[in-house]
């Protein structure tokens, strides 16, 4: 096994001739390729590793692969390798996962990782192909910001009404106090309504502003409650009932809370439009269901009993600028951005519908502690 400081001249995939065509291909690829042994130490690396990570091949050969990882992937990696070797269970092998990498200078950046493994007798090697997606992430964030601002504009009327109610209560309580009413409850009411306004403004600002948050542990139920708080008065005014079903012991997810909230807001506003466009006399309902899928995933379903989605539109609705609401001020980016955000979280989003009956969006996200860093 190569250890730090050892010299080696075969930093290439096993079986590749140093002067051969495969070696030239290996060296010319723009994406980093690395291999590690079962102890997590780097055996081979192509020149692209230096361009992406800042380390030369000589510097990293024999070093632990965690040198190139950011948290939480750095801490979790060795346990995932051990689990795969002990059980043979594959979770990341054969898939493309998004992880956070670490450059030599210390800055962290998002990348896509695809992992495979080769076993020859008792010798096992893992191979990883890494793609820096920083530029794509920045573009997605800029587009997401545009979509967030569009959502904020759509929320303005509802939020104004939401704020107006507690403002009126504060004014009325203050007038009663000024008139000499000694009831101490009036002061408590002013404080409660003031805190309510502060919460509404905080949630609205959180939705609109640019964030640079890292992936972290996210309470998905709390995200749902915060999103619904922004729409509560509007849904009540439009006679839309909201049903929330949260499974016991719901796992937290691994992600960015503000981005997940943006996706949820988009789905809720789309559900509202579908319900208002329905000619059915039945009660308008938006139902949200949160549950665990095994130990490593969490599912969020958003369902409305509105007009539904035509079968031929079920896939096209996720394309940029494909929207039935472009003439009504829609951007046509909401669902495209939502899919990009969920995929960047290592999750998936899909739509199911029956015209005139219902539309349902199903989001699946990795549970916290089962992130995209898994090798097995």
Image: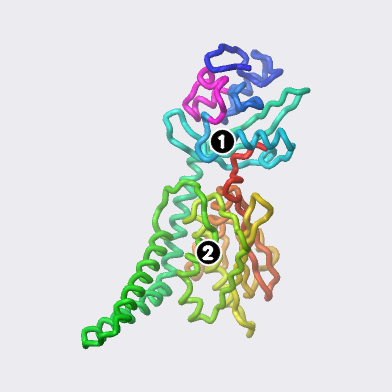
Colour pattern of the rendering: rainbow
Question: Could you say where residue 154 lies in the image, as x and y percent from the top left?
Answer: 44, 69
Figure label count: 2
Say if the magenta span includes residue 59: yes
Q: Report crowding for label 2: few under 14, some 14 to 19, many 20 or more residues within 10 A (C-alpha).
A: some
Question: Could you say where residue 163 lies in the image, as x and y percent from the top left?
Answer: 37, 74
- How far apart are the alpha carbons under marks 2 and 1? 33 Å
Q: Is residue 182 above or below residue 321?
A: below
Q: Nearer the viewer, residue 347 or 351?
A: 347
Question: Could you say where residue 202 lies in the image, as x and y percent from the top left?
Answer: 38, 63
Disc 1 on helix, strand or loop?
strand
- Rendered-image quadrant of the C terminus: top right
Q: Which residue is mark 1?
A: 131
Disc 2 on helix, strand or loop?
helix
Q: CB atoms at circles 2 and 1 under 8 Å apart? A: no
Say if the magenta span includes residue 161: no
Mark 2 / mark 1, whichever is N-terminal: 1
| Residue at the (70%, 65%) spot, across then down | 311
| Residue at the (49%, 52%) spot, across then down | 256
Q: Report crowding for label 1: few under 14, some 14 to 19, many 20 or more residues within 10 A (C-alpha).
A: some
Task: Read off the magenta span.
Answer: 46-66
- Rendered-image quadrant of the N terminus: top right
In the image, which is nearer the foreground, mark 2 or mark 1?
Answer: 2
Question: Could you say where residue 239 lies in the image, as x and y percent from the top left?
Answer: 53, 81
Q: Which residue is mark 2?
A: 224
Residue 74, disc: none
| Residue at the (44%, 51%) spot, across then down | 142
């Amino acid at each position: 096994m190569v250890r730090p400081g050892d010299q080696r001249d075969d930093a290439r995939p096993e079986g590749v001739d140093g002067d051969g065509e495969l070696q030239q291909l290996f060296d010319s690829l723009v994406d980093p390729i690395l291999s590690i042994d079962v102890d997590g130490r780097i055996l081979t690396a192509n020149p692209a590793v230096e361009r992406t990570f800042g380390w030369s091949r000589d510097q990293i050969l024999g070093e632990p692969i965690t040198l190139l990882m950011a948290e939480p992937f750095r801490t979790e990696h060795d346990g995932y390798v051990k689990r795969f070797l002990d059980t043979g269970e594959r979770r990341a092998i054969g898939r493309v996962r998004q992880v956070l990498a670490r450059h030599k200078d210390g800055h962290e950046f998002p990348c896509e990782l695809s992992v495979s493994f080769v076993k020859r007798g008792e010798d096992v090697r893992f191979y990883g192909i890494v793609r820096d997606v920083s530029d794509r992430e920045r573009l997605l964030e800029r587009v997401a910001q545009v979509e967030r601002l569009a959502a904020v504009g759509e929320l303005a009327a509802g939020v104004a009404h939401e704020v107006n109610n507690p403002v009126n209560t504060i004014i009325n309580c203050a007038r009663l106090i000024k008139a000499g009413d000694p009831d101490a409850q009036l002061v408590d009411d002013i404080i409660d309504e003031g805190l309510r306004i502060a919460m509404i403004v905080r949630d609205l600002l959180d939705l609109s502003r640019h964030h640079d948050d890292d992936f972290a542990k996210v309470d998905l139920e709390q995200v749902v409650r915060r999103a619904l708080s922004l729409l509560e008065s509007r849904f009540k005014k439009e006679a839309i009932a909201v049903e929330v079903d949260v499974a016991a012991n719901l796992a937290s997810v691994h992600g960015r809370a503000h981005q997940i909230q943006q996706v949820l807001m988009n789905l809720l506003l789309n559900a509202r439009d579908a319900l208002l466009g329905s000619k059915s006399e039945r009660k308008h309902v938006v139902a949200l269901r949160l549950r665990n899928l095994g130990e490593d995933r969490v599912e969020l379903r958003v369902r409305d009993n509105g007009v539904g989605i035509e079968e031929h539109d079920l896939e096209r609705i996720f394309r940029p600028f494909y929207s039935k609401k472009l003439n009504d001020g829609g951007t046509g980016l909401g669902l495209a951005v939502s899919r990009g955000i969920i995929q960047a979280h290592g999750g998936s989003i899909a739509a199911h519908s029956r015209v005139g009956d219902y539309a349902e969006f199903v989001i699946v996200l990795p549970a916290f502690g089962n992130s995209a860093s898994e090798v097995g």
